[in-house]
Amino acid sequence: MLGILGLLLAVAAVIFLIWKNWHMSIVSLLGALIVILFNQMDPVSAISESFMSGMSSFAGSWFLLFLLGAVFGKVMGDSGASVGIANSLLKLLGNRSVVLVVMITGLVLSYGGIGTFIIAFSLYPIAVALFQKADIPKKLIVATIMVCPVTVCMAMLPGSPSTQNLLPTTYFGTTAYAGAKIGIICSVVMFLTAYLYLNWQIKRAKARGEHFVPSPGESVMDLQSADKGKTPEVWKCYVPIVMLLAAMFGFQILFAIPSTFAVACAMTLAILIGCFLYRDKLNVVSVINEGAASGLGALIATSSIMGFGNVVSASPAYEVVTNALVNLNVGPLGTALISINVIAAITGSSAGGLNIFLSSMSEYLLSTGLNTSMLHRVVCIASSGFDAMPHASGIVVCNQIAKTSHKDTYFHVFITCAILPFCCAILACILGTIGIV
């Protein structure tokens, strides 16, 4: 019981300190020490093996993508290419379409196989220019950027290349397109409700007299710069992004390399193209150095929280909690919905919650005789709910990139990336129960 109390106190401490803008590396270490103390774990092995191995494993796996993603975002931002894209989109769709533009762009990039972290780096320069032009408060920018990559594309849309959508295939013998009807219905519901919520919040903010205010130390190029010829020509603005998507698919098809390496190679190509096209508007050395520093700072912060999650997963209390959850007597779908969300909330990881649940309960789910395609989609959507806690890595990274605080942004992230997808998971259970697959 003391160990379980330690888990709860650790998660609460992590959330509180994040709220107070403490650095993520300090927060993660303190949270890990609380877990270690209350679970009577050996502090030396817990820190050196669990914490550091979790941290170093993540850092090693994501080093290239964080580095290249941050540099790419810096190239697009400092050259004015992101402003050029934002300006052309607003001229085409109007100021009221800012949320729609950002959501659709995030959806396309995510469904194309680009990870959440890289989308945050790539999309932020465009989103912040759009928000400034439309005078939308920055407290809504993280939710707008994150909502599609961490809900619709991560778990709901059939065929998504996300880890969450691929994990169930190894347990149920299904494909990435399993439960297509459930996935499409939930995707539409999720997208529309998030879009309506964000626009409602924009109207409320403007009624209260709130405006766009850059973060301290942040310089955002005004969209009027595009009309004054200070940004690259419109076609040049789009070339690196188009090449990024084309090259990513091309490298995977032509050379049969893993998607992460394909994205890294495609990003390198996009950066080189951007530096060449925008050479008259960039100090290339400065942009690359500053982008690298930003990316590595975000990588350390994110890796730290992964280290905390590893300590939590290694604790005796965590095993007790997961065993109790997966043995709940509330029916297979109810068990999946509750268990995956509680585990994901503790670790701040949807993939972690889903993997732990499936490794323990997949055989039981199969023994029920329920449609495996339905089970695939239901457990996948369930993983996209309460994983979006303040210590979730994607949320931490996006706030760092945007130079915003959890205190300002998290309420809207919680509604769009936790409450709404959890409701969609309930809808998925209902649809599966009545035979819609």
Image: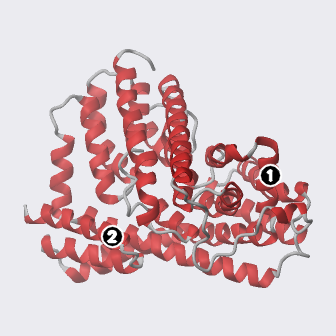
Mark 2 to mark 1 CA distance (whole Å)? 37 Å
- Towards the viewer: 128 or 355: 128
> Which dot marks residue 308?
2
- Towards the viewer: 260 or 95: 95
Point out residue 392 in the picture as x, y percentages from the top left corner.
41, 60
Which quadrant would the C terminus be assigned to in this image?
top left
> Callout 2: helix, strand or loop?
helix
- Up/down of 194 relative to 212, above or below: above
Tell me if residue 324 can be seen: yes
Q: Residue furthest left?
A: 1
- Towards the viewer: 167 or 164: 164
Residue ID for mark 1: 242
Q: Amino acid at mark 2?
A: Phe
Q: Earlier in the sequence, mark 2 or mark 1?
A: 1
- Up/down of 102 relative to 275, above or below: above
Q: Residue at x 30, y 69 (%)?
A: 16
